[in-house]
Amino acid sequence: MYKLRRLWNRTVTDDIFNMREIPEEKKQFGSHMTDDYIIPAVYDSSVKYRLVEEYGHTCFTEQEDGKLYTEWGFTTQKDAVEWFLSFGNKIKVLAPPEMVEIMKSTLDSIKNLYES
């Protein structure tokens, strides 16, 4: 699998590739994963490049203050927390309340690591 947005210098050639048979179980890539846990968040505009790289240029709504609003689904709370933490102080999770609390407690536990 390729991320098409990472293919920079594409050229059309006359090369021909033979089609390969894909096993049925591989055709359903990712079908066992769901992203039903929707989390709205606001990102600082300085991380716009990363949002575009990961989700494309239409993945957010730019707000009047320049911040970038998203509403994405995640497979698990753990996946969401890890994603959000990778943005440091450039993101604010808005809802649901239990996710906001998970973020707060996770950040508290990180802070505690540095206080002892």
Image: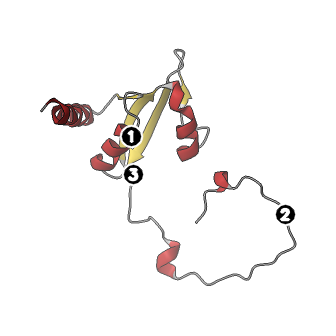
93 and 114: which is toward the camera: 114
53 and 95: which is toward the camera: 53
Residue 9 is left or right of residue 20, and the answer is right
Kindly state the secondary structure of the residue where label 3 is placed. loop
Image quadrant containing the N terminus: bottom right
Location of mark 1 (residue): 86
In the rendered structure, which amino acid carries the disc numbered 3?
Asp
Q: Nearer the viewer, mark 2 or mark 3?
A: 2
**Vertical order, 85 against 44 (above or below):** below
Kindly state the secondary structure of the residue where label 2 is placed. loop
Residue 5 is left or right of residue 83, and the answer is right
Residue at coordinates 20% horizontally, 31% vertically from top-left?
A: 111
Location of mark 3 (residue): 35
The x and y percentages for residue 43 are 45, 28
Residue 12 — which label?
2
Determine the image quadrant of residue 62.
Answer: top right
